[in-house]
Image: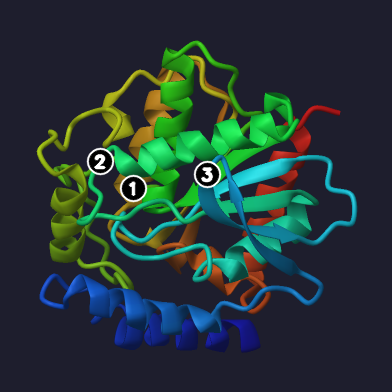
Amino acid sequence: MLQHLLESALRQTMNRLVRPVLNPTVPVPLQRRIVRQAYRSSIPPKGAKFEATTVGGIPVTRTSFSIKPPGAVLYLHGGGYIIGSSSTHRGITGHLAKTSNCSIVTPDYRLAPEFPFPAALDDAEACWNGLLEQGLKPEQIAVAGDSAGGGLAVTLAMRLRDKQQPLPASLTVFSPWVDLTQEQLYEPECEPVLQPSWTSKAAKLYAGKESLSNPLISPVFGDLSGLPPLLIQVGSQEILLNDAERLAEAANRQDVETRLEIYNSLWHVFQVHSGQLDRATKAMETAGEHIKRHLAG
C-alpha cells in the first residue's frame, strides 16, 4: 500500500516538476540548471563514493561501492543529448555500482547544440579507449546508459564492431532513445516525463546536418548483428516504449542475446528512484546481475 502511494506521488512529482521543464520553449541553458536541481531527489545509496577525474581525455565521474571491483561500467547519461551530466546521474550510478559491484565511469560527453553529432559518440569512444589504456580488458567492461545515453551505448558498440575492435561484455539500456525520427512514438494514456515536442527539438539539435535516420544517430535502423548481450528496461507510461520494443525485435532478428523488460505503470527512466521505489530498486538489481553475469571471470 505504501509503495503504491509512493509510486503515485513520484508520478505526480515528475508530471508537475520535470515535464514542464522539458519543453521546447524553455531555453536549453535554463533546462540544464533546473534539471540539475531536480535530480537531487535521486539519492545514491550510503557507501557510494564519487571521484572526478579524466579517462581518455574526457572528464568523468567514477562511482564506486565495492572495495575491489571486478570490472567497470561505462555509463552514458541521458538528457536528449542536450542536458544532463555525470553529476545529475549520481543516484543511478551509485545504485548500479552497488548492484553490479563494478566501478561506474560516467563521462561528461559534449552536448548539443554547442556540439552536435558525432561529438557525444566520439567522446564515448575516447572514454572506452581510455579504459583500455588503463589496463582493463574489453571483457571486463560493460556499457550502459539511459534514454539518449541508451541509444549512445548501442551506437558505441556498433561503431566498435564496424572498426573490428573488441566489444564490451554486455549492454544495458534504460528507456533507450533509438529512433530520433520519432515516426513511431508510443502514445500512452499517461506520460509523466517526456513531451514529443521537446524530444523532437532535441533530436534536431543533436543531429545537426545529419539525417535523423543515420544508424549512428538512430540505431534501430542499423545493423545490430554481433553486438553483446543486451538488457532493455522500459516503462509502459512513456513515449519511448515502441523504441525499446523495436530495438529488442531488431536485435532478436539479428541473433543478439536480448532481454526486454516492460514495467507496467512506470515512467521514463524510473530507475532514478532506486532506493525509494521497490520496483525501481528491483530493476536495478536485475541490471546489476546482467552486468555481473557477462563480465569475464
* Residue 18 appears in the rendering: yes
Residue 223 x/y as whole percent: 35, 18
Task: Tell whether 58 sits left or right of 166.
Answer: left
Crowdedness of circle 2 by 10 Å Cα count: few (<14), some, many (20+)? many
Q: Residue furthest top?
A: 164
Question: Which residue corresponds to the image point at 39% horizontal and 53% vertical from the top-left?
Answer: 147
1 vs 3, front mark: 3
Q: Which residue is mark 2?
A: 117
Task: Answer with left or right where residue 15 lies relative to residue 228.
Answer: left
The quadrant of the rendering that contains the C terminus is top right
Q: Would you place residue 234 above or below residue 156 in this image?
A: below
Q: Within 10 Å of the Cα at label 3, are there few (<14), some (14-19), or many (20+) other Cα atoms?
A: few
Front residue (pair 3, 40): 40
> How many angstroms separate mark 3 from mark 2 (CA)?
18 Å
Cα gap from disc 1 to disc 3, whole angstroms:
26 Å
Query: Mark 3 sits on what residue?
Result: 57
> How far from the left and from the top, in percent, is residue 280?
60, 66
Which mark is first along the chain, 3 or 1? 3
Q: Nearer the viewer, residue 169 or 290?
A: 169
Q: Earlier in the sequence, mark 3 or mark 2?
A: 3
